[in-house]
């Protein structure tokens, strides 16, 4: 049975509509106008226990609104949601013990106290006994490479250290479902890599389910086999990351480094020429032709080096969102 | 002791100790807040001046206004103490947590957010305690004739009345706080309540100085039970204890379900902004 089961989920917000300028302000004061903004429309999602799923979409696409409904923070306007066998918006204690939501730009730790104080409070709130909470804190601190930072006031920690401490607090109760909203936002490359490997490790160790939104494609490619794409509140792709690449990028890029420069027309029968710069030639070759054409290239030319690449995922997804905007 | 009770007690201990540690980080600010609560001493000065009373003089007799200068001094010191332990600011913290998105984090944990705010208030009261003792000592140095020690029974009743006063103020403010779910600035409503609080609570004058119909009307509102009644008990004045506690009980019985109802309705409206 799916651990996250969403059927026909929609959310419409009523927002005040105010025109700029003094006239607009006065009209807004006398007679407020509101309009209905559909943030999420008729979404269906089913996630099995242990999956790590990437949730992608441009700003304002409805990702965070969906996460808020899945965690029970806001009520859906229509549709049904079940997470870990519960209706999230009922906010039953048993449900809350099984989930966590990490928001990259928000902090839950007590700002003026060391993370250990917040962790003590978390342990007490979730009813984890002292010995067990100490064991978990040590384990998580090892995994996240945190040590004396845990006894320093949160305000004195770097962004990366703070994010890691936030993750510790969010995972101390060993939730079965993790909702992560931009967990690596603002972190440097090294810290991003550490957080990613920690999440992968945590998923392996505990079998937790992860639904992750991120603007860093590195997070998605490193962690998620499956992605959900959302645009203007509608889900329009639910499948493997690889399938997305196959569907949207039917060609692969082959880079050749030749011993001698050759005229461009000599490569026409192998694929479409993307660029040529002296000895370096870049060709786009259809996937089903790749093996045959690469064999031909190696046989026909004096090749010093050859490289086969997929176009970057962000480029593919960016292209997809641009196409959706155009329609 | 069963596991549930043990966990509950541990939660209370951990919440209070972490909030106390947090408040200690702001001890200088809290000392200033305590010092800024000297309005009762100003009122004492005004009433003493207006009626020609002199509390520093042990032989002072009743003033032309019929005020006992020593009782007046004790009353306003008791008002100062009661105020220090019944201050409620949940509406401002909640409003900020709501706007900044911190409330979402609290709502995702299996502990009703209200308990965090209650524990923060109690921790703050504990932080204020040394400043209150110091200011009371200073007061007795200036007005030695007003020195008194309440009897254990009076002290017990006064402490109970202060706890009820805190509960009453907290419930009223928390009911107003739930307006945050509909309007971003609920604290404006709290300012509206400040006027009846100021006039009817006994903060600016002892209740017996009010005209009888006003005094009687005031006793049906929750305001005198927030300051005047606990202060009178602390100062050793005569109070109809049973009637007072019964009125407070009635108000709590009205406010508690109302606040719970508003909270539940508000949560349905919650938009998790800033989160």
Image (tube, grey):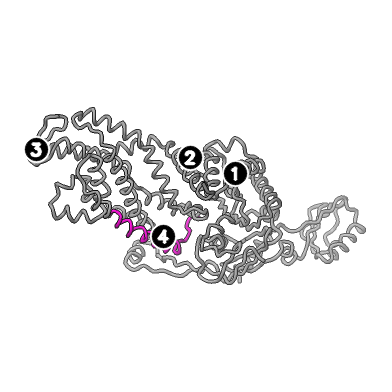
**Badge 2, how many Cα within 10 Å: few under 14, some, many 20+?**
some
Q: What is the distance, in whole Å, between disc 4 and disc 2 at their CAs?
A: 29 Å
Horizontal and vertical percent position of residue B71: 17, 38
Tag 1 residue: A133
Residues tagged 3 and 1 counted as in contact (Cβ below 8 A): no
List the residue tagged with mark 4. Answer: B263
In the foreground, A197 or A36:
A197
Camera-side residue: A292 or A72? A72
Residue located beneath label 2 in the image:
A112
Q: Are marks 3 and 1 on the same chain?
A: no
Direction from residue B142 to residue B2 in the image, left or right: right
Q: Residue furthest front?
A: B1
Residue B183: percent from left, percent from top: 38, 60
Q: Are marks 2 and 1 on the same chain?
A: yes
Q: Main secondary structure of the magenta part?
A: helix
The reply to whether dot 1 and dot 4 touch (C-beta < 8 Å) is no
Would residue A240 be counted in the magenta stretch? Answer: no
Give neighbour class at mark 4: few <14, some 14-19, many 20+ (Cα, 10 Å). some
Magenta residues (range): B247-275
Residue placed at 34% from the left, 53% from the top?
B173
Q: Tell me which label, 4 or 3, sits earlier in the chain.
A: 3
Marks 1 & 4 on one chain: no
* Chain for numbered disc 3: B
């Amino acid at each position: 049975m799916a651990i996250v089961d969403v059927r026909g989920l929609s959310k419409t917000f009523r927002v005040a509509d105010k025109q700029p300028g003094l006239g607009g302000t006065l009209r807004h004061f006398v007679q407020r106008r509101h309009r209905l903004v559909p943030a999420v429309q008729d979404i269906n999602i089913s996630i099995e226990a242990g999956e790590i799923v990437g949730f992608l979409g441009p700003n304002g696409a409805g990702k965070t609104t969906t996460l808020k409904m899945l965690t029970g923070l806001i009520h859906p306007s229509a549709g049904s949601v079940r997470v870990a066998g519960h209706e999230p918006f009922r906010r039953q204690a048993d449900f809350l013990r099984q989930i966590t939501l990490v928001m990259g730009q928000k902090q839950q730790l007590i700002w003026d106290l060391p993370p250990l104080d917040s962790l003590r409070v978390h342990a007490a709130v979730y009813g984890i006994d002292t010995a067990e909470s100490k064991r978990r804190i040590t384990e998580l601190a090892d995994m996240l490479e945190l040590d004396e930072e845990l006894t320093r006031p949160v305000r004195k920690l770097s962004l990366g250290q703070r994010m890691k401490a936030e993750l510790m607090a969010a995972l101390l109760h060993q939730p079965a479902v993790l909702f992560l909203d931009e967990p690596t936002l603002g972190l440097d490359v090294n810290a991003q890599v550490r957080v990613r490997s920690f999440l992968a490790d945590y998923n392996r160790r505990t079998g937790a389910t992860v639904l992750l939104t991120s603007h860093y494609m590195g997070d998605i490619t490193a962690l998620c086999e499956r992605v959900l794409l959302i645009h203007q509140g509608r889900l329009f792709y639910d499948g493997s990351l690889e399938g997305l690449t196959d569907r949207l990028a039917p060609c692969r890029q082959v880079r050749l480094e030749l011993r001698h420069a050759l005229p461009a027309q000599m490569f026409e029968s192998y694929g479409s020429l993307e660029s040529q710069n002296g000895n370096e030639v870049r060709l786009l070759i259809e996937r089903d032709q790749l093996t045959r054409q690469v064999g031909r290239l190696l046989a026909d030319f004096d090749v010093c080096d050859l490289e086969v690449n997929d176009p970057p995922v962000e480029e593919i997804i960016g292209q997809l969102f641009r196409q959706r905007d155009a329609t | 002791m069963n596991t549930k009770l043990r966990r509950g007690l541990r939660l209370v201990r951990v919440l209070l100790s972490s909030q106390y540690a947090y408040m200690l980080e702001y001890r200088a600010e809290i000392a200033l807040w305590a010092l800024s609560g000297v309005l009762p001493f100003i009122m004492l000065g005004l009433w003493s001046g207006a009626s020609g009373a002199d509390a520093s003089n042990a032989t002072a007799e009743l003033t032309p206004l019929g005020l006992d200068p020593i009782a007046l001094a004790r009353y306003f010191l008791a008002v100062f103490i009661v105020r220090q332990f019944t201050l409620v600011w949940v509406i401002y913290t909640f409003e900020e947590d709501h706007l900044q998105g911190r409330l979402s984090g609290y709502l995702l944990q299996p502990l009703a957010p209200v308990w965090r705010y209650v524990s923060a208030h109690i921790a703050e009261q504990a932080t204020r305690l040394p400043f209150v003792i110091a200011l009371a000592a200073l007061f007795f140095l200036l007005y030695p004739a007003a020195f008194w020690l309440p009897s254990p029974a009076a002290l017990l009743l006064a402490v109970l009345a202060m706890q009820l006063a805190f509960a009453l103020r907290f419930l009223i403010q928390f009911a107003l706080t739930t307006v945050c779910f509909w309007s971003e600035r609920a604290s404006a409503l709290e300012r509206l309540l400040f006027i009846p609080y100021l006039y009817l609570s006994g903060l600016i004058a002892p209740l017996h100085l009010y005209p009888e119909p006003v005094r009687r009307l005031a006793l049906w509102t929750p305001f005198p039970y927030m300051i005047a009644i606990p202060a009178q008990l602390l100062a050793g004045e005569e109070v109809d204890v049973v009637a007072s506690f019964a009125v407070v009980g009635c108000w709590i019985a009205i406010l508690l379900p109302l606040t719970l109802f508003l909270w539940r309705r508000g949560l349905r409206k919650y938009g998790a902004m800033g989160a």
